[in-house]
Amino acid sequence: MREQRTKSIYYKLISLGCDIYLGENKNEFFVVRHSCVECKSSWYMNLTECYFCGMLNSYLYYCRRCENYSSTTGGSSTCSKCKQKKKKVCFNDDCVTNKKELVEEFNNKKNGVMDKNSPSTTSQSHCINCGSDKNFYSSSLVYLKEVDQDTQIKIDEEIKKYDALIFVKKDCTKYLVVNRNSKKEDLKKFKDEIDLNALF
């Protein structure tokens, strides 16, 4: 398989929330995914939320005087209208950090409660899809195999060594993920996307 094709599959899996660990054989790799126990959607440790109410970080600055929002990405931390310093606040109006008597306490000590150095933020602790607080890591040892358009797929001895095999059709983006539980009728079902359920 061409190196460019192999790398595109790695990047595809990374975009789906997986981590890739490579060995000496470029067609063999270890894939890990951090997921919600309940609904299996991705769990993002780099996503932050308010410690007090669970509101996700929206990565916006807020000027209380002008009631103006702006992006933290490339945006200035100083308000262009009133020149007051903007803060990274929690956007849940009912959050304790936005109560009139506590706004100054929570938002002035740091750069706001959603600032990365604030003790009031935490990494994701609830699923953004279903709200569950249970998460886990799943992993698979995977082998990539490129096949011709008309190749008959067979499960052979390779499956005993790996948790999953990913078959990729030559000259098109069609994938077939096979694991030890795959049935014979599944071996003809190439898809446009990599099936993460079959991978783990």
Image: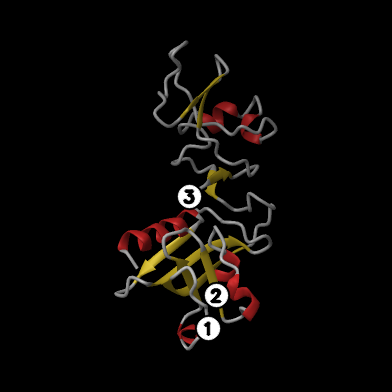
Residue at coordinates 68% horizontally, 62% vertically from top-left? 38
- Residue 160 shows up from this direction: yes
Instruction: List x then y, in percent, for residue 18.
Output: 48, 60
* Dot label at residue 178: 2
Residue for badge 1:
155
Quick check: 90 above or below 76?
Answer: below
Comparing 140 with 164, the one in front is 164
- Residue 200 shows up from this direction: no
Q: SS at mark 1?
A: loop
**Within the image, what quadrant is residue 101 found in?**
top right
Q: Mark 3 or 2 closer to N-term?
A: 3
Query: As shown in the figure, which amino acid type bears the numbered disc 3?
Result: Asn
* Dot label at residue 57: none
Quick check: 26 above or below 64?
Answer: below
Instruction: List x then y, in percent, for residue 149.
Output: 47, 68
Check disc 2: other Cα within 10 Å, few if <14, some if 14-19, many if 20+. many
